[in-house]
Each structure stands twice: as structure tokens, then as C-alpha cells.
């Protein structure tokens, strides 16, 4: 009886064993594509526990309802999966939702036979393994049925297959649609970054064409992608997240599409020498954020190559950050937003490094550096920020921040405010260097109690309420040891340097004949120098002409000398100038009489050099006469206009119309106000 039972079992099992022996292997792997480059060489991080489904094709060679689910399995720890099936046509589908809880990656790579979306809305079957961003369509994956599965590959099983491999990235952004649970969206990238430990670098590979946003310029369409967020974005909480707006090619994701070429500030026709200028690249991605805070970094982050606007505080940084080629408050073509925000960049903690960043259209402050933050910025462009009685381009409420080679232009408030104007936050050790500060309500404002700040080698011009000025302070909160050195002051509305608020702001300072320090005065109230003579030696029309300037200050001080003009004839030349202040339409229609009102009487002061005082306080310095020395400020567009003024109009003044002023700087950096001017005296004979 037992032998018969064995025989029966063996007979029943024979067809099953025969089927197993005739079945073919269909295998592959599922991997994380960390760099999002869709390269086989990068598929080294296996994804275990991923659900893989096998469907037998119903005969129409398309993933549809007539296809039957044959088997389902999960990848092992090494990312591999294996099916055994009869010969025939099959579909392999990956359930991307099963890859990692709390995150949702996007497909980047597929095997031969994979269905891959194209930006024109079509789907193609790739003939060889390679890039397959987004999977089958630009939509989100629903692997509950084959018809709604996104990550699908067709396999003709007539021999064993072992390389049906897929790859996914947590960093790929393929969609310009916003909403919760949208695969490949920017919002999902932020969610992924917060839930996947380690660095996350956004790879923008759009699966839709860029829309034309403006009329063509010289035949070139103005195209870029725009993502509008209906609700606030989550904070970035995991360290080392990079938001990268460079649009990549879906077939070669290492290559940029460059659909929006050019640089901000470039003219329609570019001279070869202009290419050497370091300018902001026009980005291809615009983010329209919403809510009280737009993009928020709660941990170390970086941003590059996009424009962002919309939220009250557009970019909020609560940890170390780096920004490059970012426009805040403007579209990718640098057009300011119609609706102004409150603060463009709000630095609350950590060190922020910014290079080639534009900030505009903010009702309060363009860049606000809080007490616990620190800022290093160069090639910044900050404009249209603040109101006449508050705010401005940059508010420095921290110690040790530095600004270099930037432009703060046409802000309704001040260009730069150092410290809190009400005296509640005295700061020190900040540096403003090589920067153009032009056309603001005030140039640089020194708040009560600020110390050891340096403002040097800047172009400070056309600011309505003075170049560098203090705000009202109490006797025990006077600013001090603030160095104001080698700047060029041109046509600011009041005195170029205002440290004494009790004196007439339209009259230059006179020496006090005392070297005593006044502890209740700004910069210890050090006296400006006295220039006793300014004589030209030689023919003033010759390149060899020299001017010798003599005077007195206090022993141990450095005296900086500035060329100025004491004449009304300079005003008469202004009407012939093509551009002043970079305001083309207004200045081309203004009358000469109105120009006299617009141009303040204090005038221009161009730094030419310095001299050390002797033990008795006297000084002497000789310079080439026919010079107007450039500073190292780098605001190309503004400088071109001011050079007309400094190098054409000023140079045209007759010798006796020229004058010289000076400031004194003590060993601690305390700088005086600008002295009254000394006109050039009658030419003396040249020794032969």
C-alpha cells in the first residue's frame, strides 16, 4: 500500500517537474542611481525589499487589462530578483512606492524594452538600456495594476534573461506640477531629502517643454520652466541638500538644455572683453513660493541656478548655506516681481556664502543678516528694497560679515545698514569693500554703538541723504573705530560723510584745531585735516603735471586725499551728459534748471592717495594732476555711467576749478568727516 502511494505521488509530480525544467529564468536588479546620471557604472547601490511584478502579455503587446499577473516577488538585499516562466512575452513592473517608506524616488534608468516618456508627451520603447527618466509617462506610479504602472519593461522570453535592471533616484525632479504625493515633483524632492540620510543633489530633468514666458529678444524665445506652489514647502531638515535649477537633457542628464541662454546685464551685442566680466547666468527654472516663508534651510544647504519669488520671507537660512546664480524677487530674466515680498534672504544662523545673487522687490530688506548669522557675499545685485523711512538693501545685525564687488542700487531705503538703527544691536568687524552703492535713500548707515567696521574702496554716489551717515545716538552709544577709506563719493544729497548730526548737513566739516578725542562723538570726533595749499607744478595740460598738497592733521594719523571741484561750470556740463545715475528716461528729459536742483552742492570726491603725518602733524603729498583715479568697485553697469562723470566732466574742469579735500584716520580706524575743499592755487614755475 505504501509503495502504491509513492508511485501515485511520483506520477502526479512528474508534469510539475517537467514544467520547472522547461521554464526560463527572467532576472534583474533594482538600484539607487545616486548621481541621477542614468549610467550603468553608477548602479552600485542595491535596493532590497522592492516589489517586482511579472505579467504575461495578452497578445496586444501593450500593458493593458488583458495582461495576466503571473508572479510577484521582492528584491533581495543585493537588489536582485528572479522569476521562472515559460517562453512568451511578458511585462516586468516595479512598484516604486515599495522602495522606501516616507520617500518616493523617480525612475532614471531602464532596460532594453522599457517604456520611457518624452517631453513631447509620447512614450517610446527603448531598444537598449539607458536613460528612462520618469518611466512610462510624466505621471505618478500606481503599481496596483499594470495599466497604471509607470516603471515597466517588455521582455520577450525565448532564452534566459538576467539583465532586466531598473534604477531610481530620490533626487530627480521631472515635473513642474506641485501637490502632495506627486512623483518627480520639486515638493517630493524636498520630502525625499528630509527622509533619506546623506547628501541630496537635485537633478532637474523636465519631461515637458519650457514655456515661452516673454516676447522673443532678437529672435530668441524667452523660455523657462515655472513651478507654482499652492501651499508652503516643507523645511529642508537633512544636511547637505542642494537645490539645483539647471535643466538637464533627458537623454544625456549630464548636459544642460540651455533653453534660456545669456547673462543678466549683457547687452544684445556683446564685445569680447565683456565675456570676462563675472555676471549672473539667466536661469531656466522659476519657483513661485507661498506662505510666510518660502525655501527654508534648517540644516546645511546649497542653492544654484534658479529664480524664486512669492513668499513673505523668500529664502530663510537657519544653518550654513551657499548660493550661486540665484535671483530672489525676480523672474529668470531679472524682471522684478510686481508684488513685493518682505525680506528676500533672511540669514538667521550659520555662515551664508553668496556669489552672483540678485535680490530685488522687497518692501523691508533685501538681505537681512541676523545676530546669529554671518554673511560673505560678492557680486551681489540688490535693488528696489525698503521704504524711505525704513529697511533697505542690506541689514547687517551680525559681526564679521563681508561684502565685496557688489551693487546696491536704487533702493527706496538705505543701501546698507550696519547695526540696528534703534541701538539695540551694536555690531562690529563687518567689511564693505569694492562695491557700488548708488541711488539709495542713504548710502551706508552706521547705527548706534557699531565699532570696527570697514567701508573701503567703494563707489558711494547719488544717495539722497548722504554717502556714509550715522543715525541718532546717545552719548554712551557713539559709533567708533569705523574706518571709511579710499572711497569715491559722487554727488550724494548731503555731506559725503555725516558723523556730526548737529552740524549743517550741507556744509563740509572744518578742522577743530584740537587732537583731543570726544568719547560722546561718532568715531571719537576726530578732526578733519586742514589743507593749507594745493599747487600745480608744470603745465597743467601736460601728462607730467603734478600737484602738491600740504596741510596738517594730528600726529600719527593717515590723511587720505580726494580730488573735488569748486565750480558752477561743472553743473553746466551735466546737461550734455548722455546718462547719469543709470536712470535713462528721466535724465534725458529733465531740464537744465531741474538738473541744478537735482545735483547737490556738496559735489564729488574722488580718492587719489594718502599721506602720513609727521611728528608735528603736517603732511605733504604729490600726485599727477590730470587724474581721476578709479576705485575697484565692480558694478559694471553703474560704473559706465559714473565714468562719464568722473572721467569726462570732471577732467574738463579748468585747473583753478579743481579742489582737494581730505579725511583723517587714526591708528584705531576712527575716520573723520570730509574736510572743506582747498582750490588749486595759481600755477608755479617749473624748475629747469
Image: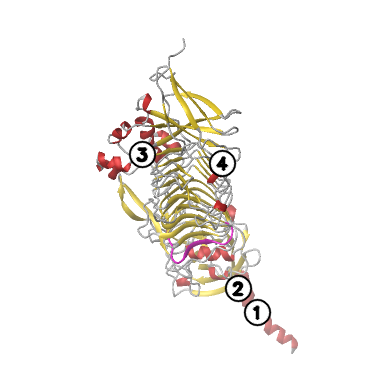
Mark 2 or mark 3: name the one nearer the start of the chain.
2
| Dot 3 and dot 1 residues touching (CB under 8 Å) | no
SS category of the residue bearing label 3:
loop
Q: Residue at x 40, y 36 (%)?
A: 604
Residue 601's disc number:
3
SS category of the residue bearing label 1:
helix
Mark 3 or mark 1: name the one nearer the start of the chain.
1
Mark 1 or mark 4: name the one nearer the start of the chain.
1
Mark 2 or mark 1: name the one nearer the start of the chain.
1
| Dot 2 and dot 3 residues touching (CB under 8 Å) | no
Residue 13's disc number:
1
Residue at mark 4 to residue at mark 3: CA–CA distance: 26 Å
Using the image as rendered, state which of residue 559 and residue 444 is in the foreground.
559
Task: Indicate the position of residue 164 as horizontal and vertical percent values.
Answer: 56, 62
Based on the picture, tell me whether residue 157 belongs to the magenta stretch.
no
Task: Indicate the position of residue 211 as horizontal and vertical percent values.
Answer: 35, 56
Amino acid at each position: 500500500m505504501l509503495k502504491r502511494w509513492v508511485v501515485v505521488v511520483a506520477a502526479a509530480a512528474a508534469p510539475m517537474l517537467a514544467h520547472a525544467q522547461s521554464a526560463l529564468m527572467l532576472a534583474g536588479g533594482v538600484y539607487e542611481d545616486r548621481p541621477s546620471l542614468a549610467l550603468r557604472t553608477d548602479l552600485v547601490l542595491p535596493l532590497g525589499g522592492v516589489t517586482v511584478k511579472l505579467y504575461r502579455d495578452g497578445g496586444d503587446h501593450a500593458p493593458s487589462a488583458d495582461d495576466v499577473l503571473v508572479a510577484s516577488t521582492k528584491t533581495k538585499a543585493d537588489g536582485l530578483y528572479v522569476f521562472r516562466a515559460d517562453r512568451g512575452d511578458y511585462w516586468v513592473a516595479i512598484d516604486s512606492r515599495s522602495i522606501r517608506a516616507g520617500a518616493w524616488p523617480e525612475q532614471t534608468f531602464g532596460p532594453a524594452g522599457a517604456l520611457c516618456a518624452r517631453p513631447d508627451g509620447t512614450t517610446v520603447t527603448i531598444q537598449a538600456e539607458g536613460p528612462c527618466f520618469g518611466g512610462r509617462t510624466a505621471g505618478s506610479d500606481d503599481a496596483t495594476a499594470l495599466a497604471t504602472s509607470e516603471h515597466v519593461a517588455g521582455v520577450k522570453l525565448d532564452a534566459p534573461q538576467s539583465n532586466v535592471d531598473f534604477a531610481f533616484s530620490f533626487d530627480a525632479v521631472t515635473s513642474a506640477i506641485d501637490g502632495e504625493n506627486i512623483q518627480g515633483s520639486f515638493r517630493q524632492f524636498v520630502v525625499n531629502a528630509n527622509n533619506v540620510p546623506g547628501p541630496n543633489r537635485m537633478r532637474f530633468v523636465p519631461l515637458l517643454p519650457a514655456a515661452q514666458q516673454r516676447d522673443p529678444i532678437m529672435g530668441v524665445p524667452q523660455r523657462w520652466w515655472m513651478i507654482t506652489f499652492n501651499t508652503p514647502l516643507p523645511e529642508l531638515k537633512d544636511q547637505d541638500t542642494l537645490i539645483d535649477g539647471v535643466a538637464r537633457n533627458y537623454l544625456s542628464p549630464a548636459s544642460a538644455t540651455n533653453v534660456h541662454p545669456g547673462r543678466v546685464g549683457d547687452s544684445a551685442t556683446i564685445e569680447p572683453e565683456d565675456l570676462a566680466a563675472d555676471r549672473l547666468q539667466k536661469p531656466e527654472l522659476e519657483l513661485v513660493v507661498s506662505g510666510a516663508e518660502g525655501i527654508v534651510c534648517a540644516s546645511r544647504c546649497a542653492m544654484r541656478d534658479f529664480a524664486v519669488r512669492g513668499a513673505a520671507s523668500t529664502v530663510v537660512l537657519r544653518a550654513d548655506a551657499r548660493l550661486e546664480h540665484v535671483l530672489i524677487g525676480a523672474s529668470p530674466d531679472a524682471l522684478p516681481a510686481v508684488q513685493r515680498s518682505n525680506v528676500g534672504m533672511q540669514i538667521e544662523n550659520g555662515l551664508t556664502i553668496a556669489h552672483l545673487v540678485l535680490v530685488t522687490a522687497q518692501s523691508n530688506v533685501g538681505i537681512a543678516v541676523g545676530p546669529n548669522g554671518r554673511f560673505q557675499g560678492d557680486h551681489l545685485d540688490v535693488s528696489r528694497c525698503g521704504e524711505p523711512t525704513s529697511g533697505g538693501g542690506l541689514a547687517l545685525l551680525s559681526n564679521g560679515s563681508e561684502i565685496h564687488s557688489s551693487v546696491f542700487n536704487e533702493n527706496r531705503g538705505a543701501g546698507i545698514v550696519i547695526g540696528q538703527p534703534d541701538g539695540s544691536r551694536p555690531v562690529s568687524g563687518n567689511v564693505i569693500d569694492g562695491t557700488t552703492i548708488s541711488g539709495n535713500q542713504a548710502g551706508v548707515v552706521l547705527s548706534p554703538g557699531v565699532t570696527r567696521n570697514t567701508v573701503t574702496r567703494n563707489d558711494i554716489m547719488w544717495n539722497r541723504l548722504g554717502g556714509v551717515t550715522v543715525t541718532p545716538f546717545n552719548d554712551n552709544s557713539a559709533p567708533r573705530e569705523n574706518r571709511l577709506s579710499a572711497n569715491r563719493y559722487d554727488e550724494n544729497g548731503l555731506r559725503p560723510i555725516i558723523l556730526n548730526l548737529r552740524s549743517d548737513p550741507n556744509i563740509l566739516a572744518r578742522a577743530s584745531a584740537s587732537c583731543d578725542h570726544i568719547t560722546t562723538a561718532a568715531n571719537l570726533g576726530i578732526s578733519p585735516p586742514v589743507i593749507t595749499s594745493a599747487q600745480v607744478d608744470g603745465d597743467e595740460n601736460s601728462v607730467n603735471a603734478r600737484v602738491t598738497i600740504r596741510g596738517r592733521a594730528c600726529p600719527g594719523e593717515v590723511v587720505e586725499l580726494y580730488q573735488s571741484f569748486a565750480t558752477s561750470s561743472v553743473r553746466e556740463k551735466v546737461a550734455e551728459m548722455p546718462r547719469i545715475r543709470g536712470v535713462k528716461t528721466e535724465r534725458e528729459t529733465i531740464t537744465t534748471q531741474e538738473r541744478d536742483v537735482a545735483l547737490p552742492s556738496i559735489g564729488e570726491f574722488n580718492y587719489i592717495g594718502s599721506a602720513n603725518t609727521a611728528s608735528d602733524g603736517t603732511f605733504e603729498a604729490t600726485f599727477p594732476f590730470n587724474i581721476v583715479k578709479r576705485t575697484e568697485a565692480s558694478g559694471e553697469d553703474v560704473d559706465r555711467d559714473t565714468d562719464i562723470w568722473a572721467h569726462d566732466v570732471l577732467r574738463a574742469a579748468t585747473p583753478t576749478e579743481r579742489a582737494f579735500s581730505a579725511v583723517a584716520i587714526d591708528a584705531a580706524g576712527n575716520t573723520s568727516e570730509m574736510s572743506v575743499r582747498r582750490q588749486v592755487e595759481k600755477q608755479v614755475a617749473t624748475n629747469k
